[in-house]
Amino acid sequence: MTTILLVEDDITFSLMLKTWLEKKEMQVDSVSSVSDAKKRLEKNRYDIILSDLRLPDHDGLFLLELLKERNINTPMIMMTSYAEVGTAVKSIKLGAFDYIAKPINPEDLLKKINDALNQQEEKKEEIAPANTAHEKRDVKQHYIEGKSEQALRLHEYINLVAPTSMSILIHGASGTGKEHIAKLIHEKSSRKGAPFIAVDCGAIPKELAASEFFGHLKGSFTGAFANKTGHFMAANGGTLFLDEIGNLPYEIQMQLLRALQEKKIKPIGSNKEVDVDIRIICATNEDLKNALDNNMFREDLYHRINEFSIQVPSLCERKEDIILFANYFLDLANEELNKNVVGFTPETLKIFQSHSWPGNLRQMKNAIKRATLLARESLISEAELPSELLSKEPEEWNESAALRDESYEKRQIIKALKESNNNKSQAAALLRIDRKTLYNKMKLYNID
């Protein structure tokens, strides 16, 4: 179980955060000052330290110095309502793993915690015996390249474009690993030591988009209780990954274009422009050319983000890689669930090879994790597979050409809306797309 030392003098916020983390099966000790944190660190070892910047007796930077003096290598994530860029940079230079601005997005915090834990695990592997370290790295690596012709071509493009400064647009269906590819490009570039910031454009409310991207000053609008560092400043010097760029509101697209062209941003409420140096990588599961034709996406922005395009093949298009991914996900599931399943029965492998995998790698990973949990023998059999893999799929869903046909897509959307009694969330789930994408497609096809 992950152990966390939470250093926060706001008792209400501390209790709320402690409760949420414990629901995520983490053990949390909470204190309200640096002196109390010092006492806990003398008695206990922790996997992560979460500390507020402003504390009653000292600040978080003092705690960082204390950790350094005592050779305590526990990763520390700084929490701050101020979020000054200078302070954030200083904390990282002093040894903080990362920082997060209040009000805290719980999922962002969880991602940072997991990233810190993964980094610690990698450090342990580096000093482990060579054979053990090799085995663990095989399980821990973030992306399997594959051996199919499509996979080899994909990674040839990645290796060619990664060292350049070109903006990249990644096309691919949901679940094909577009964010993993963006991270791989970042890691192979000269910016690999700088931040990689991933943003889900479909999850940003229209009215908050400018603040999320460019930040704001305290009091600049109702609800701006503290300064906020936007995604551009957070990614400064590194890579900004915009997932599902097609979901970005049209008026925000213009602001984004200006920031990319001029390499300057102006936080809301500020009179000063700030220089930024970022590489932009975008991803979409939509045909942006259709959005261009229907005036839902700016053509000038499209050309700005699309200096180089990469098409990620669906899992069903790379049959040679299916068993390779299956074994990789089995290794991950074994490690996470503390199981020791050896492999798959021949019947299970045939099912994997014949299934169309509409949810791609994400669907396969979830299916194998579930099967690993249920497995009682050394091999996963049909009995442990989810019903969706065992039921005969309608022929229309196996035709990749049909999926690209606009009239077919329109019929499928209308059918899903009827089946869900016009419940947009349920219809999106049936279509395996997000709600924002459904709205865009309904507008595209003039579906009321």
Image (cartoon, rainbow, N blue to C red):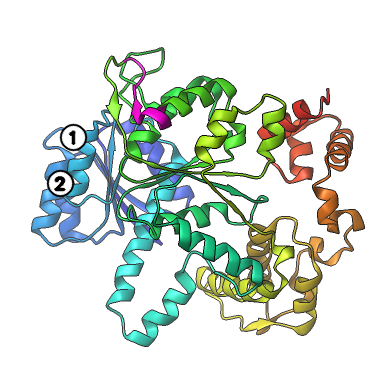
Above or below, comparing residue 308 to residue 132 in the picture: above
Give percent across and percent down for residue 17: 39, 40
Q: Residue at x 48, y 51 (%)?
A: 24
| Pointer 2 local density, CA inside 10 Å: few below 14, some 14–19, many at least 20 | many
Q: Could one spot residue 295 in this view of the protein?
A: yes
- Identified at 67% across, 30% down, the residue is 292
Rendered residue at 76%/77% (across/down): 348
Circle number at residue 388: none
Between the residue at mark 1 and the residue at mark 2, the CA separation in whole angstroms equals: 10 Å
Q: In the rendered image, which quarter is residue 437 located in?
A: top right
Which residue is nearer to you in this view: 99 or 138?
A: 138
* SS label for mark 1: loop
Residue 169: x and y, percent?
55, 45
Q: What residue does disc 2 label?
A: 63
Q: Quadrant of residue 61?
A: top left
Q: Circle 1 sits on which residue? A: 55
Mark 1 belongs to which amino acid?
Leu
Quick one: label 1 or label 2, which is nearer the N terminus?
A: 1
Which quarter of the rendering shows the N terminus? bottom left
Labels 1 and 2 touching (C-beta < 8 A): yes
**What span is in magenta?**
259-269
Q: Is residue 265 magenta?
A: yes
In the image, taking residue 264 as reference, residue 327 lies left or right, namely right
As shown in the figure, which amino acid type bears the numbered disc 2? Answer: Leu
